[in-house]
């Protein structure tokens, strides 16, 4: 790499020196916010969003899992995701077109809801 040049990073990814939640706060008193994490398939979106949720909500996160184990590869990815989530997070698994009702029923005041 030429002197003075910085290494390239993936578009949309935060700089390495910045944590996912830097500059963001979770306000359980009611200030609603929404953060949309976009990226390509297997680009690290879930990992980045989980780190952010951990920083903002700690143990109080509702994880809404929407993946459908349509084949063996997807079933394995779902298994790995389950294993990496903190045990303190509550998880609701929702498949199908309607998320609002199942999420509303599952929500117990967690300051962070992560929809993956």
Image (cartoon, rainbow, N blue to C red):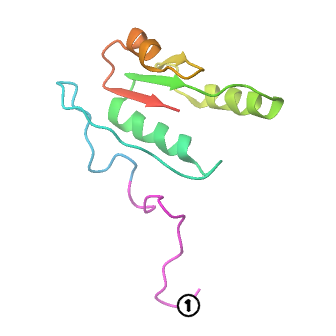
Residue 9, how many percent across, how many down?
Answer: 53, 67
Residue 41, how many percent across, how many down?
Answer: 64, 48
Q: Residue at x 32, y 38 (%)?
A: 34
| Between 45 and 19, the one nearer to me in the picture | 45
| Between 94 and 85, the one nearer to me in the picture | 94
Q: Quadrant of residue 93?
A: top right
Q: In this picture, which residue range is highlighted in magenta? A: 1-18
- Considering the whole magenta stretch, tell me its main secondary structure: loop
Q: Residue at x 48, y 21 (%)?
A: 99
Residue 54, how many percent across, how many down?
Answer: 41, 34
- Quarter in which the N terminus is drawn: bottom right
The residue where tag 1 is placed is 2
Residue 69, how many percent across, how many down?
Answer: 73, 25
Residue most toward the top?
Answer: 105
User: Within 10 Å of the Cα at label 1, are there few (<14), some (14-19), or many (20+) other Cα atoms?
Assistant: few
Any magenta on residue 31? no
Q: Quadrant of residue 74?
A: top right
Indicate left or right for 98 with 17 as reference. Answer: right
Count of marks overlaid on the render: 1
Residue 86, compared with residue 14, is above or below; it is above
Residue most toward the right?
Answer: 72
Q: Residue at x 41, y 44 (%)?
A: 36
Residue 9, compared with residue 12, is above or below; it is below
Say which element carries label 1: loop
| Between 62 and 115, the one nearer to me in the picture | 115
Q: Residue at x 25, y 39 (%)?
A: 25
Any magenta on residue 6? yes
């Amino acid at each position: 790499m030429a002197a003075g040049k910085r290494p390239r990073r993936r578009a949309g990814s935060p700089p390495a020196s910045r944590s996912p939640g830097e500059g963001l706060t979770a306000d359980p008193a009611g200030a609603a916010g929404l953060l949309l994490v976009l990226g390509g398939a297997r680009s690290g979106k879930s990992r980045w969003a989980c780190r952010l949720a951990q920083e903002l909500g700690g143990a109080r996160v509702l994880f809404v899992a929407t993946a459908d184990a349509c084949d063996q590869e997807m079933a394995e990815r779902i298994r790995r995701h389950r294993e990496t989530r903190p045990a303190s997070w509550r998880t609701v698994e929702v498949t199908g077109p309607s998320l609002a009702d199942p999420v509303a029923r599952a929500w117990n005041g967690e300051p962070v809801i992560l929809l993956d």
